[in-house]
Image (spheres, rainbow, N blue to C red):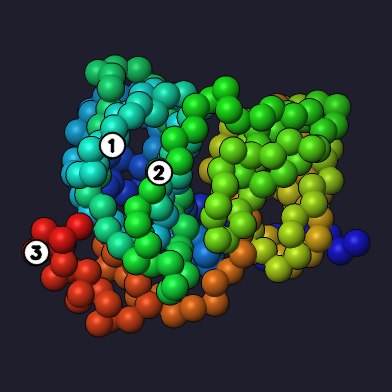
Amino acid sequence: MSDRHLTRRIRGIDTADGAGVKLKRIIGQPGLDMLDPFLLLDEFRSDDAGDYIAGFPEHPHRGFETVTYMLAGRMQHRDNHGNSGDLMPGSVQWMTAGRGILHSEMPQQENGLMWGFQLWVNLPAKDKMIEPRYQDISPERIPLVRPAEGVEVRVIAGELGGAIGPVEGIVTAPIYLDISLQPGATLALDLPVGHHGFAYVFEGESALVGGELLQRSELGVLSEGEQLQLRGGDKPSRLLVVAGKPLKESVTRYGPFVMNTPEQIHEAIADFRAGKF
């Protein structure tokens, strides 16, 4: 069985999005424009309300999926189709924008820690204009497994140790795992052959990923292979391991629109301005 190793290391860059929410952009920046099928990865983390209180007022999307994973704090989402809901600590929202949607994500707190991730996942050309849909997943629906001593894994998407993540019906067959490692704990993680993947350490100081030390706030791009070897560092650590089937299609994007050709981007802008979302 071939092991995966790290082919690149990327550190997030400080930026702001929405109405001024401060965050770190890890995928979707000059150092890593995309990792097919993943278009963007942001980590937002602050206990200063001034960094997040303005939130993400109503904005459009077309042609891809957004995945919000909350670790701390509360956000409320609303859209122009009449949907609304609360994102609480430990919850996930997998939104398939498809042909177009207008939605907002606004803080439901005025102080305290706001912490989480947003991942953008591309849609294939044949699915870019499908009807929008949400998968709102509460914390209790996400299985927690202990596949080895000193290891805990929240299975958001994919399968591990007989537990199946609640995210379903996604064409890129994603794996999305939140892995906690005690010092020195080890895990041999099977990943689908052909999937592109990454690991991102977000708590603790470091972890060994594919035999190499990955520091906190550092993303490691994974090589091809069948299995990923993980080992905890000197202190407890926590990381995301995410993988998905690459689409291998042309990508043209403009802000919140991700299509295959410039002509389709022009059409998306025209449709948005005409109120067709």
What residue appears at the point 23 percent right and 38 percent down from the top-left corner? 82
**Location of residue 176 by image quarter:** top right
Q: Crowding near pointer 1: few (<14 within 10 Å), some, many (20+)?
A: few
Relative to 111, residue 254 above or below: below
Q: Crowding near pointer 3: few (<14 within 10 Å), some, many (20+)?
A: few
Point out which mark residue 274 bears: 3
- State the CA–CA distance, disc 2 to disc 3: 24 Å
Point out which mark residue 134 bears: 2
Q: Are marks 2 and 1 in contact (CB under 8 Å)?
A: yes
Q: Position of residue 120 (x, y in %)?
A: 43, 55
Query: Which is nearer the eye, 270 or 26?
Result: 270
Name the amino acid type tagged 2.
Answer: Tyr
Name the amino acid type tagged 1.
Answer: Asn
**Location of residue 76 by image quarter:** top left
**Image quadrant occupied by the N terminus:** bottom right
Quick check: can you spot residue 132? yes
Q: Position of residue 260 (x, y in %)?
A: 37, 77
Query: SS class of the residue under badge 2?
Result: strand
Name the amino acid type tagged 3.
Answer: Ala
Residue to which mark 1 is pinned: 83
Q: Crowding near pointer 2: few (<14 within 10 Å), some, many (20+)?
A: some
Residue 276 appears left or right of 167: left
